[in-house]
Amino acid sequence: MNNLAAIREEISKELHTHIVPFWEKHTNDPVHGGHFSCLGCDGAVFDTDKFAWMQGRGIWMFAKLVNEYGDKFGKREQWLSLAKSAVDFVRKHGYADNGDIYFAFKRDGTPLIHPYNIYSDCFMATAYAEYAKAAACDWSREEALRLYKRIQERAARPKGEWTKSTGERSFMAMGFQMIQMTMARDMADVLPPSVVEPVVDKSLDIFWKLHVKRDKKRVFERVQPDGSLNLEVMEGRLLNPGHALETLWMVMDVANERGESRMVADCAEAMLWTIDHGWDKEYGGIYYYQDYLGHPTEQLQHFMKLWWVHAEALCAFLLAYKLTGSQVHYDWFVRIWDYCAKHFSDREYGEWFGYLDREGRPSSTQKGGKWKGFFHLPRALMLCEGWMQSM
């Protein structure tokens, strides 16, 4: 299939018939509130623990559906109720004494894991901001701002007392700077432009000057603080094609908003580097991890094909086509969509399988877990639907 209108119809059906209803039906805990994320093939809960990442991402997604579609599908109140369930759960159970967000909870809200991971707070900050807009909730808006300020206090040492490194070897991870940029943009209704723009500027500067290596035609996950590479160790050679593509489409979106056509073109070029080495030329699909020099990776799952990698790749190549008109980017978008529809999508029970082996077969029947929830896939399909509509 290569007709844009036909693919848009497929993506819209996938989102509104197979993805959103799955989570509407299965994610909410009717007893204690909050969202389950460990869901089997048919949506049955296989682990009742709850995770702050999944609460925040679920709140954001249901609130985003409200803000994007209103009552177009007659689900506005249902979506608000589902978002509120997790908001109330985190508000009641989520906070350590210092105001940071615990990482995991028992079903009833009893904390299980200390707030070692600042991403919990990042996802909750953006969730509160989106919910404030959907529900006209002043408390949620104020809490989003408080969390954002606290995140900036922790930014220099995000894991605090739970930091494992001795400090002898230092790497800068691309992920935190990128989430700083996307968080600031997602919270534009909460934060003043005088706060948002410098954060975006800094993130873009770090990305292009430190992580993008034009001479090597790669986007490196981790670099030394001065941007130099340490290719003697696995961590310094790590490539994650999906994360590179996710970052590139987000940077491209910012560049387009700012009218920076040169940066849009640079992103489109880097996408082609990434897919050229990241695509499995024998079985299709995008590898999870790679080593720049071709050595074994620390991650034994490096050859697997993951749902979020492909969801973000769809966003990358469709946005590049939309903004540049490049046929090669459109062809990649079609190729990736065809792979996803064939291998990830489960039309019997809904949602996508999250983890495929190299040959494209589900390695697990789970539809959600500790790391997979109601976020990457619906966000990607919603964005793609909207971009195709605008074209």
Image (tube, grey):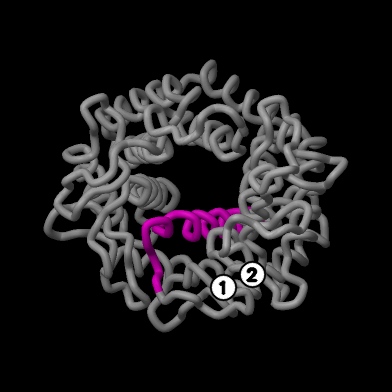
Front-most of residues 133 and 379: 379
Which quarter of the picture shows residue 31?
Answer: bottom left
Which quarter of the picture shows residue 226?
Answer: top right
Q: What type is the residue that disc 1 sits on?
A: Glu
Q: Position of residue 309 (x, y in %)?
A: 59, 59
Q: Which residue is mark 2?
A: 337
Q: Residue at x 40, y 69 (%)?
A: 367
Q: Position of residue 365 (x, y in %)?
A: 41, 76
Say what secondary structure mark 1 lies in: helix
The segment highlighted magenta reads 366-391
Q: Earlier in the sequence, mark 2 or mark 1?
A: 1
Q: Which residue is mark 1?
A: 10
Q: Is residue 152 left or right of residue 269?
A: left
Estimate how packed mark 1 is, as few (under 14), some (14 to 19) or many (20 or more) residues with alpha carbons within 10 Å.
some
On whether residue 159 falls in the magenta region, the answer is no
Q: Is residue 188 above or below residue 309?
A: above
Q: Residue at x 54, y 27 (%)?
A: 167
- Whether residue 235 appears in this view of the structure is yes
Q: Residue at x 63, y 55 (%)?
A: 242
Front-most of residues 42 and 224: 224
Q: Is residue 86 above or below residue 226?
A: below
Q: Are discs 2 and 1 less than 8 Å apart at CB?
A: yes
Q: Position of residue 63 (x, y in %)?
A: 36, 47
Estimate how packed mark 2 is, as few (under 14), some (14 to 19) or many (20 or more) residues with alpha carbons within 10 Å.
many
**Is label 2 or label 1 in front?**
2
Q: What type is the residue that disc 2 sits on?
A: Trp
Q: Is residue 238 left or right of residue 121?
A: right
